[in-house]
Amino acid sequence: MTEDTFDIGLIVNVHGLKGEIKVLPTTDDPMRFKLLKTINVYNGEQKTAYKPGSVRAQKNMLIIKLKEINDRDEAAKLVGGVIKVTRSEALPLDEDEYYQKDLLDMKVITETGEILGNLSQIIETGANDVYVVKEAGKKKDILIPAIRECIISVSVKEKLMTVKLLDGLLDL
């Protein structure tokens, strides 16, 4: 069984001469890197664990020093790697918050029990996320805003989301 992990960053470049890496965070809370006791870097299926040294923000990136990496050439070997955490290392969620990974491929039904399809994608917008529901056998997707008025219930355990379609939503 493969380990249940979440991507939290992508190593995009090196920084300086002392082995620092430049990371594009893919998590809602980039400063969560400061809480990690181990940084797991995946290159394909190969996982290597590192001890974090310093973590600092620079524009939309993080500059991270790994204790085991001490020069630019060693750091360059990590470029393209993905930083992941296990489910047990993931930040706790508030009520009515979900990991995107848990929502994808979830069956979506209306409050009257009509099957709409499966949640195939999550679009992040400035105001709220939008769930893309792929209807079985149809070319057109249904776009549902992730707002309280539309999302009635979510059961991660049952992989089931119940929604209320606002007037005109299917006409889009």
Image: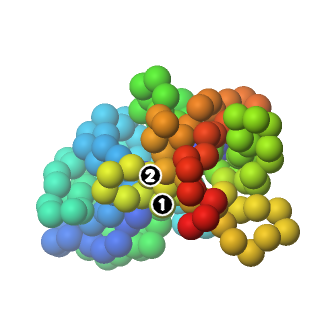
Q: Residue furthest top?
A: 95
Residue 87 in sight from this viewpoint? yes
Three-letter residue code for mark 2: Asp
Q: Which residue is mark 1?
A: 123
Compared to 113, does 41 lie above or below?
below
Q: Position of residue 93 (x, y in %)?
A: 45, 29
The residue under the point 17% across, 55% down is 57
Q: Position of residue 64 (x, y in %)?
A: 25, 55
Left of 59 or right of it: where is 11?
right
Element type at marker 2?
A: loop
Mark number for residue 97? none
Q: Position of residue 44 (x, y in %)?
A: 61, 67
- Asked if the residue at tag 1 contacts the one at tag 2, i.e. Cβ–Cβ closer than 8 Å, the answer is yes
Q: Which residue is mark 2?
A: 129
Q: Position of residue 14 (x, y in %)?
A: 27, 72
Compared to 75, does 29 lie above or below?
above
Which is nearer the eye, 84 or 111? 111
Three-letter residue code for mark 1: Ile
Distance Cα–Cα, label 2 vs label 1: 6 Å
